[in-house]
Amino acid sequence: MNKAGHIPAVSVVLPVYNASAYVHSCISSVLAQHFSDFELIVLNDGSTDNSWKIISTFSDGRIRAVDQPKNRGLIATLNHGLSLARAPLIARMDADDLCAPGRFERQVRFLKSHPEVGVLCTGYYTLGERRTRKIVLPVSDAAIRCRLLFASPFAHPTVMFRASCKTHYPEGFEGAEDFACWTQLAATTKFANLPEPWLTYRIHPAQESKVKAVQKRASRRRIMEDYLRMLGCPPEDGRMDMHLMLSDGAGVHTEAGLHQAAAWLAALHTRLSGVLPEAELGKELALRWVRLCAASGLGLQGRNLMRSVDLIRYMPPFHRERIKATLKLIKRS
């Protein structure tokens, strides 16, 4: 229990909206952390179910429960939580996820020993699909910056960042507010991901990311275009449609379309090699190319095109077997 006037080491921001089925186990997983010097800011965003009643059953002194009678939306609620945070480090949780007991301890230790890193996330497990999966994201700052070209390199509920980053979630990017936040912070801080899974990410039909899929795609397009401009690589007319398909890993089903994708990837490699680390950039672009060819449905034609592009040489050794397997599947089609 935090003493009156004590400034905790970590502020945890947890927005809640109609999460009565999950919020008790979520809060319990945070309170069970090995690292105990934190405050948990739980913001009930106008829930119409029993979420607030469940939140109110907890009596732990580290909890600061805030009831917003009217629903303000995720971005406004997150920013309200950030405004209430008192600690030098801020962590995130979502109301339907579970935090591993050693997560905060591991993240605090890493940030203490890496003062140049302002934003730190972790790997995670998925829960709710046919099988549980372990997800490992890009680990190094260089790889993370390259991933930002096409997608968020972080699992948002795993984030811990320094309050000195002056972080806020920008309005107008519904469904991808975290992605927008990281691309904006890329100019001022370094990033890292811990490869170990320190969170269980629950997948279910009502979760925010699925409900707002259409809005999220439109937001992602704007974010990626802004990031390319920030890197000095503004896309020419029509290029963002192709870039979005490369981000999705699907949507190109003709030989001409794949040639256009290859041309855009080559242009990105040429224009960004002096801005982003070439090896990591090449890996990210090659990965996008392989995924797009595999999803094209062009069979042997797609296989031959995949192999003809020079970017393939950047694929790391541990991806080579995956590429071989992909080529076999394409050959059979």
Image (cartoon, helix red, strand yellow):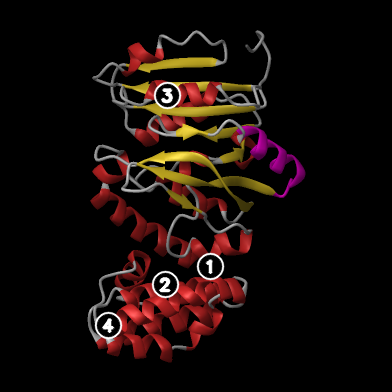
Q: Earlier in the sequence, mark 2 or mark 1?
A: 1
Which element carries disc 1, helix, strand or loop?
Answer: loop
Find the distance from the CA under tag 2 to the CA under tag 4: 22 Å
Q: Nearer the viewer, residue 296 or 326?
A: 326
> Could you classify mark 4 by the number of other residues whose Cα lies within 10 Å: few (under 14), some (14-19), or many (20 or more)?
few
Tell which tag, 2 or 4, sits nearer the viewer: 4
Circle 2: is it few (<14), some (14-19), or many (20+) Cα within 10 Å? Answer: many
Residue type at tag 1: Leu
Q: Is residue 311 left or right of residue 296?
A: right
Residue found at x 54% / y 84%: 313
Find residue 46 and report its image quarter: top left
The residue that mark 2 highlights is 288
| Residue under pointer 4 | 332
Q: CA distance from mark 2 to mark 1?
A: 19 Å
User: Residue 150 at what x, y percent from top left?
Assistant: 43, 64
The residue that mark 1 highlights is 231
Foreground pick, 313 / 146: 313
Residue type at tag 2: Arg
Bounds of the magenta segment: 104-116
Image quarter of residue 293 = bottom left
Q: Residue at x 24, y 81 (%)?
A: 333
Q: Residue at x 46, y 82 (%)?
A: 267
